[in-house]
Image (cartoon, rainbow, N blue to C red):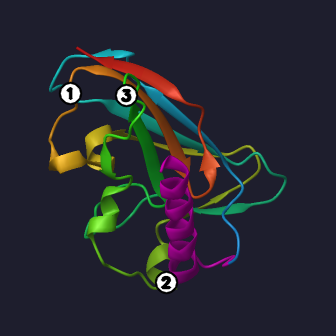
Amino acid sequence: MRPLILILSIFLGCLNKTNAQSDSTTTCPTVSVTAKLIADTFKLGKDISVEIILTNNSKSTQSVWFDKPKSSTGRPAWTSVILTDRKTGKSVLKYQNKSILQSQLYSTEEVKQYSYQLQPGQKVSGKFSLLDLVVLLDYKRTLDKGTYDMQMFYCDSPSRQLSFTVD
C-alpha cells in the first residue's frame, strides 16, 4: 500500500509541476531534502515542528517552488510525508499532503513569484507544524501515543527517515 501511495504522491507532485512550474515540465528539480524535528519525543497534543531544508547539490541552477500563496494552504509546495506507526507498520495518514484538499491552480506567472532560483550549494528552508502538512486518518487533530517513522519528500526527492515518540 505504501509504495502505491508514494507513487501517486510523486505523480501528483510532478503533474502539479507541469501545471505550475515555469522551467522544466518533465522532471523534478534536483535537490536534496533534509527534515529536522525539534525533538525526538513530543507530549500528546503538542505541536510537532518540522524544518524542511532543500539544497541544490547539482551543478546548475534549480527552479524550486517552495512557498505557496497565502490564499492556498500557505504550506510548502510539492511536499509529501509518509508517516507510519512503528508498532503496526501502517500509515496514520488519510492524505500525505494537506493541499490535496484544495483545487486551486496557479498560472506560470503566479508561481514565478514564489519560486527560488537556487544556485549550486544554495538552500531554502521553512519550519512547519507536521499536522499542518498532512491529514490524519479520520481527520484526527493529534497523533496517538506511540512511536512513528516519518519521511519527507519534495517532488521525487526523499529525506532520510526520522523516528519520534508521542507520549
Q: Is residue 99 visible?
A: yes
Q: Which amino acid does label 2 sit on?
A: Glu
Residue 8 placement (x, y as % from top left): 51, 64
The answer to whether 6 is drawn above or below residue 128 in the figure is below
**Residue sitting at 25 percent across and 70 percent down?**
71
Q: Which amino acid does label 1 sit on?
A: Asp
Badge 2 marks a residue whose secondary structure is helix
Q: Which residue is farthest right?
A: 59
Q: What residue type is labelled 3?
A: Thr
The residue that disc 2 covers is 109
The residue that disc 3 covers is 88
Q: Determine contact: label 3, label 1, CB under 8 Å.
A: no
* Residue interval drawn in magenta: 1-25
Mark 1 residue crowding within 10 angstroms, few (<14) / some (14–19) / many (20+): some
147, 133: nearer the viewer: 147
Q: Is residue 79 magenta?
A: no
Mark whose residue sits in front, 3 or 2? 3
Q: Which mark is residue 101?
A: none
Residue 42 placement (x, y as % from top left): 27, 18
Residue 37 placement (x, y as % from top left): 42, 25
Q: Is residue 17 magenta?
A: yes
Q: Distance between the residues labelled 3 and 2?
A: 45 Å
- Horizontal side, residue 29 vs residue 130: left or right: right
**Residue sitting at 47 percent across and 51 percent down?**
1
The residue that disc 1 covers is 144
**Residue sitting at 23 percent across and 30 percent down?**
47
Q: Which quadrant holds the C terminus?
A: top left
**Residue sitting at 77 percent across and 49 percent down?**
120
N-terminal of the two: label 3 or label 1? 3
N-terminal of the two: label 3 or label 2? 3
